[in-house]
Amino acid sequence: MSAVIRSGRADRLWDAMACLALIAAVTLLYRKVLRLWWTYDDAFHLHLVRSYSTAAILFERDFWQKLPNKVFTPLLFLSVKADWMLSGADARRFYLHHLFSFALLAVVIYLVARLWLGPVSALFVAILAILGPPMCEIAEQLFHRHYLEGLIFATLSVGLFVKAVRDGKSGLWSAIAYFVAMIAKEVYVPLIVILFAIPERDLRTRARRIVPHCIALMVYVIWRVAMIGPAVQPYGLTARSGEWPRILITLPWRAVQRLGGAGDLERLLFLSLLGACVVFTFVRFRAMRPLIAVMAFAALAPIGPVAMQMETRFVLVLWILAVAAAAAAPRAVLSLLLIAAIFANRAEWSTTFRKTERMAHEARFFAQMKRGETLCNPHIPPGAIGELAWLTKSAAAWSYDDLGVCNGKIPGRLFAWYEPLRVVRPRAFPFVQRVTCREIVAMPVNASFDINPGTVFWRLGPYRDGTYALVLGEGSSAFDVPRDAGFRIGKTPGFPVRVRYTSPSGWMTYSPETLLEWRR
């Protein structure tokens, strides 16, 4: 008996040390997020939570109908509102909350892994999970918080379900965690399929244990339909109907490539070792094969409607499930994978963080600009800068295109950005702009538009290489787009658009302005 007690104390000590090591690892890897300021959709979210009460966020249909993308993420807005009430517009405290959530996720992954693995192996798995290249973008962008906090509860749901199976109890607490994960982000809805696929001897007992999760899913669906309606509406870039078979067939490969991060060599080594670990588990453990197949389906299915443009955050669930599948690999191979993950993580981090940090610098500078000054070609997304102007009370203007400056339609003091030795600084624009204006030449650009309510498709040409962009107004917005694609824009009135083409050698040309109006 005393030996058992000593063993239990030793395990608890190992667990405590592992949790502290994970917190230290998260802090070491992602501490630089505390330098950041408002980026991407942060100001938009702050505007919403300041304009609506907690009750309205939970139960007022008008709140959800104002969102440009029909997604149902109440936990995200509750989390942002709580930070706003506690911290006001202090961005550093928002990032402290974000970093804390990341550390909590690492600890939860470790504790759930301990249900199957010893302390050292579970620590390997948890560190590997937080090192994945998809984690870099999640760590540095506040508007991805719903992915992060939803993953905490989804992981808890799995752990609580396995405990319930082993102890012969109901899955009530697991169902509660599953419900919270769903209201964080819809990508966690398929978790119920994974839980049902977890091996258990008696199929009837397994079905009975999943009943609370079915009830949680029903409550979620009723709530979601009441707020945003029954349709599941994709958003962002889309494709013509004839292109979708190709897009869906190539989805798994494009998702796996996205897992690898930014560096070419680092990605190749990392994905090779990850694939070897997953294949080992699939071949070696026959009982795991159905579960691995179900996990792959649950990770990829939610990406399907938005698969036209593969974003890093879309593969977060796929990454966590790949780690779960790889955990059964021999420790020597897992150790090599961990080393490869460190290099892949740092390659991805150096790429994504530099962009996000520049955006934060731009936002701070924009907040201090005065009336009559214009920030030109910022990294801040066009859909976010108006909300940033509201948040910071900045009287400055902005432009995402140089044509208005070159033809004199954008007057005043102008600022561009450059990056000497990776240090982002503002620079007065006229000297730089004279060079840019000389790069605008008269060359043909073909543009045909197919306009329907809520969606616009285009075909651009004649050039195959280079970059096309749709420029709205006099440069108030500009979006890089593929040559042949479409965009879901909801209930929007007609608007003028111009096509900008930038060649690989640097020269630019424009199409005439076209007024896009919806058919009736």
Image: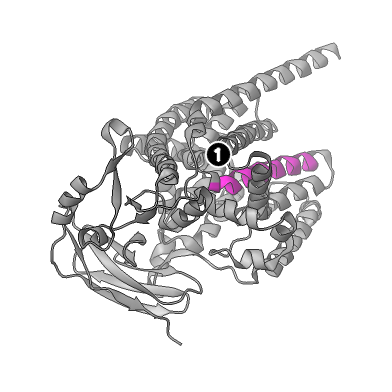
Relative depth, front residue between 148 and 375 = 375
Q: Which residues are magenta?
A: 143-165
Residue 296 inside the magenta-drawn segment: no
Q: Confirm whether residue 474 shows in the render.
A: yes
Query: Is residue 479 depicted above or below 244 in this figure?
Result: above
Question: Which quadrant of the figure contains the N terminus?
Answer: top right
Residue located 68% across and 31% down the image: 111
Q: Amino acid at mark 1?
A: Ala
For mark 1, what is the residue?
91
Q: Secondary structure at mark 1?
A: helix
Is residue 296 rendered to the left or right of residue 205? left
Residue 513 percent across, percent down from the top left = 27, 73
Place of residue 277 in the rendered image (x, y in percent of width and height, measured from the top left): 49, 36
In this rendering, would 259 be left or right of 437?
right
Quarter of the image where one finds residue 15: top right
Identify the residue at horizontal 73%, vertical 47% (top origin): 177
Front-lying residue, 387 or 125: 387
Residue 108, percent from left and from top: 66, 34
Please, is residue 56 above or below residue 195 in the view? below
Depth check, front residue: 100 or 418: 418
Residue at the bottom extreme of this rendering: 520
Percent of width and height locating residue 391: 53, 50
Q: Left or right of 145: which side holds 236?
A: left
Query: Of 477 and 231, which appears nearest the observer?
Result: 477
